[in-house]
Amino acid sequence: MKAPELFVKYLSESGYHPRSSKHGDKLCELLLADLMEECPAIRKAAQEGKICYNLNYSPGQGVPLGWNIDLAIGPPSSVEKRNTFPDGSPMKESPIELWIAMDAKTIMTEHGKARRNRQRDLNSFSSILHMKNPKTIVGGLVVINCAGSFRSPLRDGEMTIHANIERLVAESVKMFEDLPRAPSGGADPKNLNQIDAIGIIVLEYSNAMGEVAKLVTGSPAPQIGSPAHYNNFVKDICTAFLTRYV
């Protein structure tokens, strides 16, 4: 599957800024392309105009249970809008119902603090969306940096040194692997913070000028037997889609 490699290439070319949504949007677009390529059920739904997608979608903006969704997939608002691009990919518009909701997270520096915040974000994300609809396929895609140092644009380019980085990343991977998972048919009403799919991409990137990002496939990245391995993450989304919406 192509998203991890292409995202690493994108970072090398564009750099990373914590206050920009561009890298999150790019990651979600790459994930959507992999879902189209690897999941026949999602590809067929897109080709038949049964699903559309949107980025940074806020269906409940301004209400207590509102949430920004990095990638939202679901049925379009009307039959007239049920069309696709020539390659069969879904149109970009707001779905009237959430079938798939993805949260894209990054941990590029300050791992000890950031990973706890991202864990809480994903727990809240799944709880809120499953409270609205237990059938919604809720997932999280987490990018974790394994570089020994990182240049933060928010600190005038100052380099932050990451001590014990491999241990920190390994602990972070385990933390996200252990998030409670929902049953195949939908979230348990008694445990709504269960997530349907979790994926982790580990890379090495200092964000220094001219630095090339590298994808980490060995330890401490999730291996193929892990439910958080990117390939298994995509497969879990596809399986849930088949179970709940086909």
Image (spheres, helix red, strand yellow):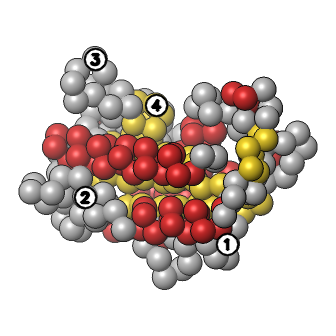
Q: Which mark is residue 62?
A: 3
Instruction: For the residues labelled 4 and 1, say whether their Cβ atoms are less than 8 Å apart.
Output: no
Q: Is residue 19 left or right of residue 80?
A: right
Circle 2 packing at 10 Å, graded few (<14), some (14-19), many (20+), is many
Circle 1 packing at 10 Å, graded few (<14), some (14-19), many (20+), is some
Amino acid type indicated by mark 2? Gln
Q: Quadrant of residue 13?
A: top right
Instruction: For the residues labelled 3 and 4, say whether their Cβ atoms are less than 8 Å apart.
Output: no
Disc 1: which residue: 217
Of residues 27 and 180, the one nearer the viewer is 180
Q: Earlier in the sequence, mark 3 or mark 4?
A: 4
Q: Work out how far the residue at label 4 is from the one at label 2, CA to CA, in angstroms.
A: 22 Å
Disc 2: which residue: 194
Q: Name above or below for residue 199 compared with residue 149.
A: below
Of residues 72 and 174, the one nearer the viewer is 174
Q: Name above or below for residue 113 compared with residue 55.
A: below
